[in-house]
Image: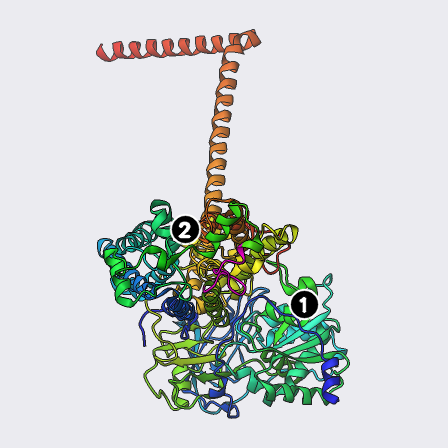
Amino acid sequence: MASILSLLRRERLWTFHGGIHVPDEKALSNGRAVETMPLPKRLVIPLQQHIGATARPVVKVGERVLKGQLLAQAEGYVSACIHASSSGTLVAIEPRPVPHPSGLSALCAVIETDGEDTWAELPEPMTRYAQLDTSEIRERIRWAGVVGLGGASFPTSVKLNPGPDQRIRTLIINGAECEPYITCDDLLMRERAGDILAGARIMHHLLGDPRILIGIEDNKPEAFEAMRFALAETDMRGYTEIRSIPTLYPSGGEKQLIRILTGAEVPTHAIPARIGIVCQNVGSAAAVADAVLEGRPLISRIVTVTGRAIDEPRNLEVRIGTPVSDLIAHCGGYRERPRKLVCGGPMMGFEIAHPTIPVTKPANCVLALTEVEAPDPGPALACIRCGRCAEVCPAKLLPQQLYWHARAKDLDRVQDYNLFDCIECGCCAQVCPSHIPLVQYYRYAKNEVWAREEDKRKAELARMRHESKQARLERQERERKARLRQKKESLEAGPGKSQTDQDAKKAAIEAAKQRAAAKKAAAAKAEETDDA
Amino acid sequence: MSATLVCSPHGSRPNRVDRVMQEVLLALVPGVLAMIWFFGWGVLINIMLAVAVAVAAEAAVMLVRRRPIGPAIGDYSAVVTAVLFAISVPPTLPWWMTLLGMLFAIVLVKQLYGGIGYNPFNPAMAAYVFLLVSYPVAMTTWLAPDMLAEHAVSFTESLRLIFAGALPSGVEWDAISAATPLDEMRGKLDQGMSIAEIRLSPLWGDFGGRGWEWVANGFLLGGVYLLWRRIITWHIPVSMLAALAVAAGAFWLLDPTTHPVPAFHLFSGAAIVGAFFIATDPVSACTTKTGQIIFGASIGLVVFVIRTWGGYPDAVAFAVLLMNIAAPTIDHYTQPRVFGHTGNRAKP
């Protein structure tokens, strides 16, 4: 009877088009509690771990820094502060390889740790934040360097400031964690459910009291129970709901989760705030609670170290800046030679070339895949137009047509087929029987379009420069001609203008002639006398 | 670890073209067994001959095009084409016609357009139609189903029929052949006979042509298997069969004396095998879901129109080829609404 009632009471869920069921592989790493990773000898902390401008360093090389001390100040509106994750000496600020699909280097602060792990003086906890001005709380979150921890790493303080004319009706806390293998959010929800709710409550306050919806995929029953238990302890029940959603990749995608929980579709090229929704990851919520209630900046995160090539997969609480190779070593090293080392999940993560790269704020998973888990897909075969890609596309695109046009470099057509609505979730490539690397084609096409836009912009600039130069030259020519004409006119018109002028000139010339003649005469006279 | 950086996704990919084709071949088994049961060993001999020629032709073209031969043959697509062709033609078809048909299908219809994935027409159906218009008599001389034949053709007799054109000793064509049920229906309706009279013919079984209805059931079973394995979706087969049944049903209700019951249309010719195995050929069919429904329904209607008023008793091959040409246009006008968009689609 009770179960029937709960069924009746269950809130409605919506579905999005497509999506795929992939073996979730979460059991590899979700069996043990989160362990704290020991302090490494050296921390390499990138100065850009977020979408937006690189933070500006505020410390000098050689300086002693303390745990939690500000290393780099957020520069510009969309940016995030970077802090030291342990105490030690700042030995360098230089480019180092960072976790990025390009494999390129970026500016990093390198700290030689002293092993003492001494905290810097932290700001006062804002336990009575409800009485504070919202801008003050946002400033604290900005100072703490909190960014979206689900992978996109958008600065949280910016997302919590939708503007005065935007009424936020729903705050969604994303606990879906739909990528296979990754379990860091699962463990976070199990172990720190209270903190997540406390963070959600702060966000609720900042956003003007919207309702809170928490979505968790139904393959994480322990996390769901932990969150429900924690919610029952709070006074948030009136406006908060925790919903178990079906396990289907990519239900953790922001737009997909919004659709599942509210039925709303975020309009293309718009942010969710436009339809009164803000979506935050559970990790970000916990980090907001740390920042506001304890004055602690974001200097560590939970990282899932997993894959069948790892000897003992598990979740680790890792200081930002710890090398990935240390994490792997801490998990017993490799059980077998990995064919691929991936940062992030298997569906959307990127392969990393150097295991020496550091853990950053958005790095939720280190995945070492064996030959069996990630076999060489072999050369791509011809597309047989089976249409499976379109069946699974959560954006309801036609991946096959996008592929044809991207391959033909027909940049207008790819945009007509809404290339920029592609979220690169990889569903299409995953089901493609011809093993065509579809996502790679879309990324390529996007880059080509961006490059073309850039070229267009440059060409436009060049055209404007050329035109203004031309105009300047023409103007100068006109002015020169005008000057000449004026001079000529004044010369020609001169005599007619004043007779006296003319006479004066003539008189002057006459006088000069006389003077010269007199001089000559005088000289001749002198010569005569000399000769004589 | 691999040295090259490869784009996501990184896991193993369960789908493969060769596995898709293998599933299709597996799904064809019940229907093919039923055909062999009712129409003799010629069916099997045709299949083996067609497969051998198709694979050899595919390999030869790859050799000429200087492409790797292994993947082209290993994807089993030529085998599928061969089997579909072989079950469409009469079980006694002379061997050189099968050879000609397969060369036409593989070299012209498939490879000259660029190979798998690029052919605008279904190769098996194109070859079938090519032979039908070139050799109409041979292509319409069918064996009678087993229970109606006066003489059951043995395996060696089948071999001699196909390779030497020699009838079994002391047996005339009439003893082993019969018109197909659709042919019989067309012919007798044209002679002014009513359905009730035609139904007395021994060719009429429980709900379709005798023997034919069980062949159709075999292919239906295979079709359900393909749906279950998600090799195909319901859109094309269901819309095609529904359109055929609705059109046949409407005319049958209007005038049951000159129009056979819808079940006859569905189970007496190539409608079932066409709906599940031929119209669903992904390469030459529509790819959008709405497009697939329009594509399938159009095939069903064209089949009914040709069967009822056209010059051929069966029309699945013609209908499929006709709609193959229309597929790209249908796809163009049936693009789905993209997530987050309000009604605007790709510009024409």
Res A312 quadrant in image:
bottom left
**Residue B200 inside the magenta-drawn segment:** yes
Q: Determine whether, in the image, residue B307 is placed left or right of residue A8.
A: left
Disc 1 secondary structure class: loop
Subunit that carries the residue with mark 2: B
Image quarter where the N terminus of chain A lies is bottom right
Task: Find residue B83 and report its horizontal and vertical position in percent.
Answer: 35, 62
User: 10 Å neighbourhood of mark 1: few (<14), some, or many (≥20)?
Assistant: some
Which residue is more in the foreground, B89 or A491? B89
Q: Which residue is mark 2?
A: B120
Q: Which residue is mark 1?
A: A263
Residue kind at label 1, given as amino acid type:
Gly
Examine the rendered structure and indicate whether residue A147 appears above or below residue A121. Answer: above
Res B2 quadrant in image:
bottom left
Q: Determine whether, in the image, residue B134 is placed left or right of residue A15.
A: left
Residue at 35% from the left image edge and 74% from the top image edge: A353
Examine the rendered structure and indicate whether residue A154 appears above or below residue A35. Answer: above
Q: Determine whether, in the image, residue A63 is placed left or right of residue B80.
A: right
The colour scheme applied to this rendered structure is: rainbow
Task: Find residue A344 and report its horizontal and vertical position in percent.
Answer: 47, 76
Identify the magenta region. B198-211
User: Same chain, marks 1 and 2?
Assistant: no
Pointer 1 with pointer 2, Cβ within 8 A: no
Q: Is residue A160 visible?
A: no
Which residue is more in the foreground, A251 or A332? A251
**Residue A397 inside the magenta-drawn segment:** no
Residue at 32% from the left image edge and 83% from the top image edge: A337
Classified by dominant secondary structure, the portion drawn in magenta counts as loop
Image quarter where the C terminus of chain A lies is top left
